[in-house]
Image (spheres, rainbow, N blue to C red):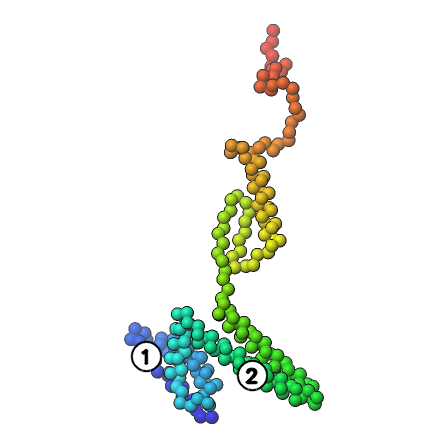
Amino acid sequence: MSELELHLELKRDDNKTERRQMTEGMLNPAISNAETCMRFMQPGWGGVGLTEAMEVLSERAKAVNSGDMREMEGTLVAHTAALNSIFIDLTRRAHLNMGQNLDVADRYLRLALKAQSQCRATVESLAIIKNPRVYAKQANINNGGQQQVNNGVPADPERSARVRARGKKIEHTELLEQSHGERLDTRTTSKARRGNQAVEAVGEVHRPKD
């Protein structure tokens, strides 16, 4: 295996120290992942430089930040094809060992199903990118009752019905208690008395003496 050409050229920034620029380069995801790509792909792609690989990854990151997902969509489509090829090859190997070595066949089948599962997950990721989920915003209006709003979470029909019923009960109770801004007297009802209490005769203990 030929030695990797990992020479990196960075544009000098006079507003930053050399140590700061080196630290930013070390933590730059485009640089670190470009090096990873080169280590795994260099044998088949001679002459590729780390600086050029870093620049390509930076351009792709800027495209995604601006909303252009075509490169990512193409990558996911390619991944589904590669994972499906792995699945087919592993199932073929499992079939060749099926009648001779069940343990080996079982291992191949397990690996094949893992590749199939990853292929399915990749397809789902691609579907989400093409058709993103929409979470509708809901106004939280509470007219004296109890209300709970969970945006982005599927509503539970039974729970929603209980909350609505509880709110109606509270609203009905408040209507009964309100009379021109006053609350009803909730104390124990006294026994009915005869006559008009406002002009009721003065008790004996308050009568003047002769």
Cα distance, mark 1 to mark 2?
Answer: 42 Å
Q: Is residue 84 left or right of residue 70?
A: right
State the residue in front, 130 or 210: 130
Residue 129 at x, y = what percent? 48, 70
**Numbered badge on residue 64:** none
Confirm whether residue 28 shows in the render: no
- Taking depth in this image into account, of 114 and 208 the one nearest to the observer is 114
Q: Position of residue 174 (x, y in %)?
A: 56, 39
Q: Which residue is denoted by mark 2 in the rendering?
A: 85
Looking at the rendering, which quadrant does residue 5 occupy?
bottom left
Q: Residue furthest left?
A: 14
Image quadrant of residue 88? bottom right
Check the picture and name the quadrant holding the C terminus.
top right
**Which residue is found at the position 57% from the left and 83% from the top?**
86
Could you classify mark 1 by the number of other residues whose Cα lies within 10 Å: few (under 14), some (14-19), or many (20 or more)? few
Residue type beneath disc 1:
Lys
Instruction: Check residue 11 in the rendering and tell me which mark sits there, or answer none.
Output: 1
Seen at 48% across and 56% down, the residue is 137
Q: What amino acid does circle 2 point to?
A: Ser
Residue 139 at x, y = what percent?
48, 52
